[in-house]
Each structure stands twice: as structure tokens, then as C-alpha cells.
Image (cartoon, rainbow, N blue to C red):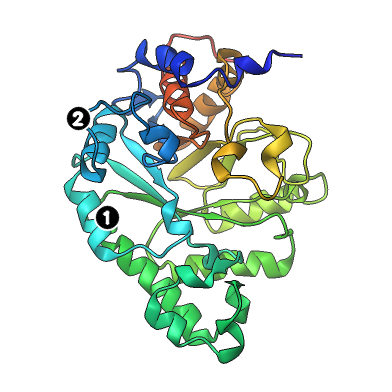
Amino acid sequence: MADPRTHDPGPDAAGERGEALAAAAREPLRVGRASVRIGTASWTDPTMTAPGVFYPDDASTAEERLVYYANQFPIVEVDATYYALPARRTGELWLERTPPDFTFDIKAHALMTGQPSEVKRLPKDLREELPAELLDKKRVYARDLPTEIEDEIWDRFLDGIAPLHSAGKLGAIFLQYPRWFFPTSESRDEIVKARERLRDVPMAVELRHASWFNEKNIERTIAFLEKYEIPFVMVDAPPGTKSSLPPMTVVTSPKLAVVRFHGRRTETWEATGIPVVERFRYLYDEGELGEWVPRIRDAADQVPEVHILMNNCYANYGTTNAREIAELLAADLPRVE
């Protein structure tokens, strides 16, 4: 069994590894026919913004941190939009603070993927329009909402990201469906409906139940996503759970392939009542990252754009691994057939 300290050595040890490769992921890489952008799924986590972890001392405000981050990586995933609807002004600020070729991937709001949202996180005017029976609930699901409020959720989400989309800085909306979203006709209809609601905004789908890719369903799942040209989000995640998908190359769109790295901390992956950052507190080693090099190169031979996001965003674990996998991809490694 591997020494746990290998995968959770603390920010100092991880930082030394990352600093040695500081320039590795600053620009998109040309791999195969694709432009490969590598970054993290956060730039604002408190463990990441803590003094001496990733940001220099003079990057102490939200603006300064984004400016610094965007000088280190060409892409970032925004996860805050899962919890609260984005405001147009925020999108305008992100646009102003990043270089012209910087890319944002945006996670869909919880209510857009059948997951619950805390009532208090909804905009005040929408809370005031909720039916009386929902006002005292801590959380609500989209299925509980009046149609006009659900429609407004989607419209406001689109309005919030509009500045990025119109400026060409929006990569894709990530629709991450929950573990109870099974491979049924109703689920597939929900994905198609989401695609229609997003109009011309690109999207990608992450599925969190292994049955989508079991022997019975794998061909249908891939054929469905290919039919609608929806990118499937490939994942590296803890193995052996109900939500674990196999690590594999699955390219279902002619335009984009996406890989997200969640870490392999099995004991916290499906646990409840723990801080989100603890779920992803895992530093990959070189061998684990190297397993993905041939898969990513395979995907890069099929599409013009590949996004790689490190969601193991405890402290500097994600930034270090982003730089390390960039270094591995850039190396003249033999292709594994």
C-alpha cells in the first residue's frame, strides 16, 4: 500500500514540485490536432488563497488573484455557479481581468441538473415568488418549482455568462448529473432538454453512475451523446464506488473533449457531512498522471480542443498536478496503442 503522505504531503512539498515546473502549463499545448488547455477547477478556494500556498503576497484581492492565475494557466473551471446563479457584472469583471485567449468552463447551477439548491442561495426576488409550502424548506429541487421560476433560473444563468460567451471566452457549460441520475429514457430526455435550453452555448456532460457505462448501456450511452454531439466528460476518480466510471477515452463531440481529475481519495468520495475540499484532497503522483497521457493524446487526435481540469483543489495540489501533466504531455513520450 502506498504511503498516504505520497498523496497528501502538504502544501510545502506540493509547492516545491509545482514551482519546479512553473511555466509548464502557461500556454495551450499542441498535442495531435488539438489545442490542449490545462488548469484547475478553482482559483479562490480558501486553502489555495492561504498565504504562501500558491499566490504571491501582493495578490491579495479577488482581482489580483484572477490576474495572477490567468498568467499561469490558460483555462479555469468556475464551480461557484453550481451554488449561486452568476451575475452579469461578475462575468464582465472576469472578462476584463483575463487575457483575450483565456477560457472559462462554467459548472451548471445545481437546479439545472436535478440536484438540490439551498433556498437561501436563490436570488431574493425568486425566493419571494416561491409557493408557501417551499418557503420553510432548507433545500429545493427543480421538480418542486413552478415552471416560470425554473425557466427564470436558466435564463438568469445564461444572462450571467453572456459576457464571456459573446467575447469568445466561454469554453463549455459542465452539466454534472448526480449519482441518482440513471441511464433511462427520461434521463436522456433531460439532457436533450438541457441542450435546447442552453441554445447556442456549448455544453459537456459528466455522469456520476457507473451503470451508464456497464456492458448493457455503454453502446447506447456513447451513441446518444454522439448523436447530439455532446462532449462526455472523462474523469479520473476514486475507483470501486457506485459513481465510479472507468478511466477511458470517450470522444463524443467533433469539437471538444474534456477530462476532469477528482483525485482518488476513496474514503471521502461518497461521504456526507465533510467539507467539499476534503473530498478532493489528493495529490497525484507521476505514474497516475502518466496513465492519462496516451488517453489524452488519443482524444487530441480526434478533436481540435481538449480541456483538462484538476478538481483536486486542496491548497496547491491542483495547480501542481496541472503543471506536471502538462510537462508529461509535452515530453516526447512513446505512444501507447
Mark 1 Cα-neighbour bin, 10 Å: few <14, some 14–19, many ≥20: many
Q: Secondary structure at mark 2?
A: loop
Per the image, the residue denoted by label 2 is 58
* 212 up-or-down from 102: above or below: below
Judging depth in this view, the residue of 333 and 268 nearest the camera is: 268
Q: In this rendering, would 98 be left or right of 173? A: left
Mark 2 Cα-neighbour bin, 10 Å: few <14, some 14–19, many ≥20: few
* 34 up-or-down from 89: above or below: above
Report the disc number at residue 96. none
Q: Secondary structure at mark 1?
A: helix
Q: Position of residue 33 (x, y in %)?
A: 40, 29
Do the numbered discs 2 and 1 sit on residues whose CB atoms are within 8 Å?
no
Q: Residue furthest bottom?
A: 132
Q: In this rendering, would 288 be left or right of 321? A: right
> Spatial distance from mark 2 to mark 1, Cα to Cα?
27 Å
Callout 1 amino acid: Leu
Q: Quadrant of the C terminus?
A: top right
Q: In this rendering, would 86 be left or right of 173? A: left
Q: In this rendering, would 25 be left or right of 188? A: left
Residue at (19%, 44%) from the top-left corner? Answer: 97
Callout 2 amino acid: Asp
Per the image, the residue denoted by label 1 is 164
Between tags 2 and 1, which lies in front?
A: 2
Q: Position of residue 281 (x, y in %)?
A: 57, 31
Q: Quadrant of the N terminus?
A: top right
Residue at (57%, 90%) from the top-left corner? Answer: 132
| Quarter of image, res 166 | bottom left
* 61 up-or-down from 295: above or below: below
